[in-house]
Amino acid sequence: METKNAHGVPPNRPIKQYRIGSFSGVIWKNEKDMGNSGIISFLTANLKRSWKDKNSGNWREETINLRKGDISKAIVLLNKLQEDMLFANEGEEDE
């Protein structure tokens, strides 16, 4: 039997998960009770970066939650940042 929250809606569930290096991404299926209109489903994503704190030795993480329309904007922004960093450091080694 599936668990449900206080509104009778099942909790959101991961649809897909990806990982590369210290980054992971998850697509979530969410459901929202719209009252008389019924329950609607929608997808969200989160991007997580994990690292081990050098001083304490504890694992830490940062998470960014994104809606469908946010992903393309984040890609454009990250591409511009990468482009500027590559041209600014032309001739220098990566840090």
Image: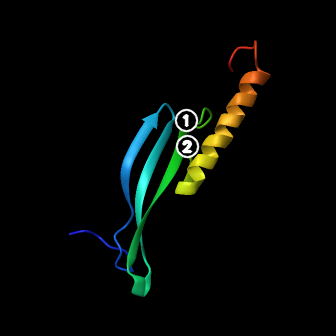
Rendered position, 18 above or below 7: above
Q: Earlier in the sequence, mark 1 or mark 2?
A: 1
Rendered position, 67 above or below 88: below
Q: In front here: 52 or 46?
A: 46
Rendered position, 85 above or below 65: above
Which mark is drawn over residue 52? 1
Dot 2 corresponds to which residue?
Answer: 60
Total labels drawn = 2
Task: Say whether residue 45 is left or right of residue 14.
Answer: right
> Looking at the picture, how far across and down is residue 46, in whole percent?
51, 51
Residue located farthest toward the left when viewing the structure as drawn: 1
Q: What is the three-letter code of the residue carrying label 2?
A: Arg
**Quadrant hosting residue 19:** top left
The image quadrant where one finds the C terminus is: top right
Q: In front here: 40 or 22?
A: 40
Q: Is residue 23 visible?
A: yes
Residue located farthest toward the right when viewing the structure as drawn: 88
